[in-house]
Image (tube, rainbow, N blue to C red):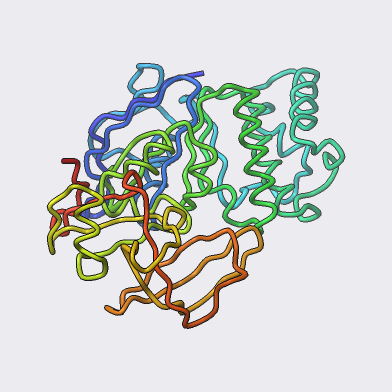
Amino acid sequence: MASVTINNLVKIFEDISVIHGVNLQIDDGEFVVLVGPSGCGKSTILRMIAGLEEISDGEILINDKIVNDVTASKRGVAMVFQTYALYPHLNVYNNMAFSLKQTKMPKQEIDKKVKAVAETLHITDYLDRLPRALSGGQRQRVAIGRAIVREPEVFLFDEPLSNLDASLRVKTRLEIARLHKSLGTTMIYVTHDQVEAMTLADKIVVLRDGKVEQIGRPIELYEQPNNLFVASFIGSPKMNFFTINDVNETKLKKMSGRNVNIDTVLGIRPEHLKICTEQQALISAKIDVIEDLGEYGLLHLITGNLHEFSVKIPDMAQQNIDDVMSFTADKKYLHFFDKQTEQRITT
């Protein structure tokens, strides 16, 4: 295992700065997920840790050793790519054994390592197959296996599930979680999918435009987002945002004990809005679209002020399009943000 420390990391492409002084501490055995929208810099940071991208400024340390000028093969890391990057002319066994053969490891030891990892990943029956004879999920497991046999100190995953269908993403996500539990190795995982981030991570790093917006445990980011961006990015369905014009201002001030005004943004997650009477209503709106997802329903509503929001409910039996409904929420589920700065209001 290994720790990874990033100090004031900067990346500049042709006079354009894309990573702006990122700082991050990753402890031994920790599973850290870098999450954010496309273009936020998460894959660039991963590639700089791997040694595949030059560092413009700052430091990267692995086990307290600066590795800025250390070649990728000497850093003790292994990377799993989105596109699998398997050798098409080699079978599964030889794809997994390739890096070990390069180190002149004895054949008997290579055989032992490859077969042990194949058993762990349930790909023993595919060792003689070429990559083209495998499904997407099987190819990704081979790519992961090729990384495991190297016994790296740090695993790097660059959106490894994005090319898989929905059911395979769930299955492979569970396999990666089990893998981390069994190996206990430091893992850094890049994704734009916040569900992957929430379910896999010990710690999440939310990025936007090459800057860190917030770092914390999944539940911390869900319950205490630092700003509007994190609040909207973490959680599925995403958080609803309202202005004073969208809600019953008197009810809101009484519920919250805050002196809210036109520059206050109220955030409430869809799962925290509760159906109530008109007299109790914090928000009233007309149903525009109904999504019945089996285990729960998702109502999409429009207020009289033409503001759209959603509500997650357990029972769909009583709702119809164009029905007017009223909602409230417990005080502990109300989030307040400054409209100008977009930062969380804590007092």
Q: Residue 260 sits in which quadrant?
A: bottom left
**Which one is in front, 309 or 231?**
309
- Image: 199 above or below 278: above
Q: Residue 151 sits in which quadrant?
A: top right
- Image: 120 above or below 169: above
Q: Is residue 83 left or right of residue 344?
A: right
**Which one is in front, 13 or 297?**
297
| Residue 219 x/y as whole percent | 43, 37
Q: Is residue 4 left or right of residue 106?
A: left
Q: Is residue 100 left or right of residue 239?
A: right
Q: How many dots with numbers? A: 0
| Residue 17 x/y as whole percent | 22, 51
**Which one is in front, 126 or 71?**
126
> Quarter holding the C terminus?
top left
| Residue 264 x/y as whole percent | 17, 58
Q: Is residue 323 left or right of residue 220?
A: right
Residue ID at (19%, 61%): 250
Residue ID at (31%, 30%): 6
**Which one is in front, 54 or 259?**
259
Q: Residue 70 sits in which quadrant?
A: top left
Residue ID at (43%, 38%): 218
Residue ID at (66%, 63%): 294
- Image: 21 above or below 278: above
| Residue 124 x/y as whole percent | 84, 35
